[in-house]
Image (tube, helix red, strand yellow):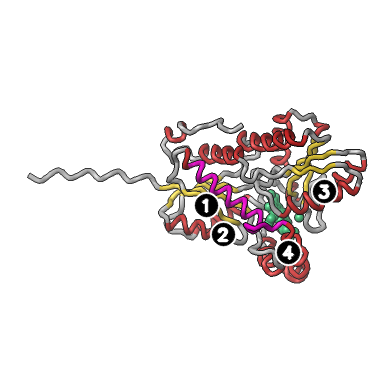
């Protein structure tokens, strides 16, 4: 008699990687590093939709000759011991999310950060996941409001890499979370904490990065997603329409961008007698050049110059515990079917506030 064959042990379910993605930033605040970064960023056809034959000579012949020196000076004004604020905060978010998932008993999930331009690159992180034997990846762009200029560009890069794989990764994408309760709650918490210390302002301005108006006309839902976040946050804070405004910053080039523009709006408001303003940037998960320099330095100065009395900047969500809670919830909600149902159901929820 032959001994019964042992039943093969069940194959463990494929392990999961969580890939946080953000824009990226220069490696150093020097003209050379900024030039490399801008060449990649502004050479992306999702970002500048001018036909390459027209655009490349303008980019390389004019913009990349002039802009890097001025941008490097601005980067130097916000650079920290840990490097670029955008990179430092995004890395912190990845490591805090790793800890959060570990505490929730989901330690085996791998969490990594990939930048669309510059390093650490998205492709390098996908290669690392592959080497770790990961077969399933949840992509979490650190852009709450979908735009083709940002989110879709990240997804293009990931899909292009996947298209070259024999055994493709199983991908899940979080396209947009402009209305996610954990994200809105984190923004509200951040704002209320600021008000506890400084009192309420005469007006709250929510400033988002702009995009060309033409992109909206052609169907990019970005503006509508920004306005949705703003309305939900205002509701949560109990603000009437007269108590807040939505504006768009960081215009690039001469075309019409989303309006109203942040700086002229704040100058006009100061002119009309607005004294105490709070400004926040809900579309940026991390503080970066556009918030720390453009808003908290340039726009501040412009507002005060026009007679405003107090300009108070509310920092981005960065490493705020409510944001890590919100991000953790967002991730768990998108892992259904990849984790045993009870692993998700058991997770602590509503621990934020
Ligand atoms: C948060 C969402 C962002 C959208 C939408 C976006 C669109 C967009 N941006 C440019 C041009 C530039 N953006 C620059 C910096 C920058 N942009 C974002 C985010 C969004 N951009 C961030 C987080 C940053 C800061 C990066 C950092 O390192 O801190 C810059 C570079 C800065 C400079 O040289 O002055 C440019 C240029 C376009 C054209 C665009 C949509 C069409
Ligand atoms: Fe930008
Ligand atoms: Fe800017």
Observer-side mark, 3 or 2, equals 3
Where is residue 264 drawn, in percent x and y?
A: 86, 48
For disc 1, does the CB lie below 8 Å from ligand 1?
Answer: no
Q: CA distance from mark 1 to mark 3?
A: 35 Å
Q: Are marks 1 and 4 in contact (CB under 8 Å)?
A: no
State which quadrant residue 80 falls in: bottom right
Residue shown at 58% from the left, 38% from the top: 326
* Label 3: which secondary element: helix
Which image quarter holds the C terminus? top right
Range covered by the magenta-colored residues: 78-101
Q: Quick one: label 3 or label 2, which is nearer the N terminus?
A: 2
Q: CA distance from mark 4 to mark 3?
A: 20 Å
Where is residue 301 drawn, in percent x and y?
A: 85, 50
For disc 4, does the CB lie below 8 Å from ligand 1?
Answer: no
Q: Examine the residues drawn in magenta and state their main secondary structure.
A: helix
Ligand 1 quadrant assignment: bottom right
Q: Which mark is residue 112?
A: 1
Q: Which residue is mark 2?
A: 120
Q: CA distance from mark 4 to mark 2?
A: 20 Å
Q: Is residue 86 left or right of 170 when viewed as pictured?
A: right
Q: Nearer the viewer, residue 215 or 193?
A: 193
Q: Which residue is mark 3?
A: 300
Q: Are marks 2 and 1 in contact (CB under 8 Å)?
A: yes
Q: Quick one: label 2 or label 1, which is nearer the N terminus?
A: 1
For disc 3, does the CB lie below 8 Å from ligand 3?
Answer: no
Q: Which residue is mark 4?
A: 72
Residue shown at 51% from the left, 57% from the top: 125
């Amino acid at each position: 008699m032959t001994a019964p064959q042992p039943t093969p042990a069940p194959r463990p379910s494929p392990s999961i990687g969580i890939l946080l993605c953000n824009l990226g930033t220069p490696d150093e605040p020097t003209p050379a590093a900024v030039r490399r970064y801008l060449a990649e960023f502004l050479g992306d056809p999702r970002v500048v939709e001018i036909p390459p034959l027209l655009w490349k000579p303008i980019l390389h012949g004019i913009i990349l000759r002039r802009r890097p020196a001025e941008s490097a000076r601005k980067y130097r004004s916000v650079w920290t011991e840990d490097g670029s604020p955008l990179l430092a905060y995004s890395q912190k978010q990845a490591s805090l999310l790793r800890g959060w998932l570990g505490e929730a008993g989901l330690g085996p999930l791998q969490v990594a950060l990939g930048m669309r331009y510059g390093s650490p690159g998205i492709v390098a992180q996908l290669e690392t996941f592959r080497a770790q034997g990961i077969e399933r990846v949840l992509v979490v762009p650190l852009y709450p409001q979908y735009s083709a200029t940002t989110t879709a560009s990240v997804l293009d890069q990931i899909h292009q890499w996947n298209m070259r794989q024999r055994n493709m990764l199983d991908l899940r994408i979080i396209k947009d979370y402009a209305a996610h309760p954990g994200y809105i709650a984190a923004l509200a918490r951040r704002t209320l904490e600021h008000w506890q210390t400084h009192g309420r302002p005469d007006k709250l301005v929510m400033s988002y990065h702009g995009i060309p108006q033409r992109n909206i006309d052609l169907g990019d839902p970005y503006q509508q997603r920004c306005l949705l976040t703003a309305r939900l946050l205002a509701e949560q804070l109990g603000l009437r329409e007269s108590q807040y405004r939505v504006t768009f910053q960081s215009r690039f080039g001469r075309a019409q961008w989303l309006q109203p523009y942040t700086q002229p709006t704040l100058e006009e408001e100061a002119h009309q007698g607005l004294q105490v303003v709070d400004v926040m940037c809900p579309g940026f998960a991390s503080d970066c050049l556009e918030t720390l320099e453009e808003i908290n330095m340039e726009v501040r100065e412009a507002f005060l110059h026009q007679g405003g009395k107090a300009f108070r900047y509310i920092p981005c969500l960065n490493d705020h515990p409510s944001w890590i809670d919100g991000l953790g919830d967002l991730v768990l909600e998108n892992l259904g079917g990849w984790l045993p149902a009870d692993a998700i159901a058991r997770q602590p929820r509503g621990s934020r506030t």
